[in-house]
Amino acid sequence: MRIIDVHGHWGPWPFHMDVGDARLNLELMDRYGIEAQIVSASEAVVLDAEAGNAALADVLAANPRLYGYAVVNPRRLERAADEVRGYLASGRFVGVKIHTTYARAPIGSPQMAEAFDLVDELGVPLLLHTWGADVALLPELLAARPRLRVIVGHAGGDAWREAAHAAAACDRLYLEHCRTVPDAGRVAYARAAGVPIERFLFGTDSTLIDPCVALGVVRDADFSDEERERVLWRNAVDLFGPLG
């Protein structure tokens, strides 16, 4: 069965881990049968969006199984629109990534509202790092932005219940459940809350986390064969178009 990973990373992080080279991305992908992976540059997330996005563009050109998110810093939007349009036009970048914590821009902040306006205008999927109860604000924010489709990265993290109800209330919110602490029952809770199978996506947080953790969550979710196929790759293709 095909697997498409919608939440990966490229580049070294300021953690005590030996990660960084695209060869590790590909090694882990091969180990677990992941056909394609959408990644953001760690430098772009943590330090400098412009420099990180530029470095990732070179990596994507040399690695056709990797696709990119152009990282947007909500506190530095002045040049982001033209920059991101250029990357999207290349065909190697397929969406936008915003990390709320590193950018110090909570979901309800004015800076995030402006960033959401930009992504709504661009019309591409947004992978949003979520962690905390402010994930509940997303349905109202998307209601005012009809083209905005948001992948709820980490499915709210510690606020996975709030994220489930938010996704049930808005048909342009997608849950992606990778995280370091795989609490039991998160997927079942979201389904019981009313989130349809078409809005679950598979992400790993690789190379920060070994993909086996996310695959274990899928294994334990009691999906039918057809549902598992949707989660592992079909929903990603429906959202992003052909990958791989």
Image: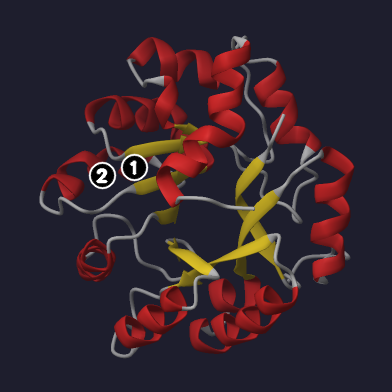
Q: Position of residue 50 (x, y in %)?
A: 50, 87
**In the structure shown, which secondary structural element does the residue marked by tag 1 occupy?**
helix
Question: Could you tell me which residue is drawn at 44 percent across and 34 percent down?
Answer: 159
Question: In the rendered view, does 174 fall on the left or right side of 53?
Answer: left
Residue plotted at (68% across, 38% down): 3
Residue type, numbered disc 2: Leu
Camera-side residue: 17 or 86?
86
Q: Can residue 125 be seen here?
A: yes
Position of residue 135 relative to residue 164, above or below, is: below
The percent position of residue 90, horizontal first and vertical second, equals 49, 78
Give the distance between the C-alpha atoms of the residues marked 2 and 1, in whole angstroms: 6 Å
Residue 177 picture quarter = top right
What's the residue at 55%, 81% (across, down)?
A: 53
Residue 193 x %, y %: 35, 15
Amino acid marked by disc 1: Val
Question: Image height check: is 123 above or below 84?
Answer: above
Residues at marks 2 and 1 touching, judged by CB atoms closer than 8 Å: yes
For disc 2, the marked residue is 138
| Furthest-left residue in this view | 144
Q: Quadrant of residue 138?
A: top left
Element on which disc 2 rests: helix
Q: Which mark is residue 135?
A: 1
What is the quadrant of the N terminus in the image?
Answer: top right
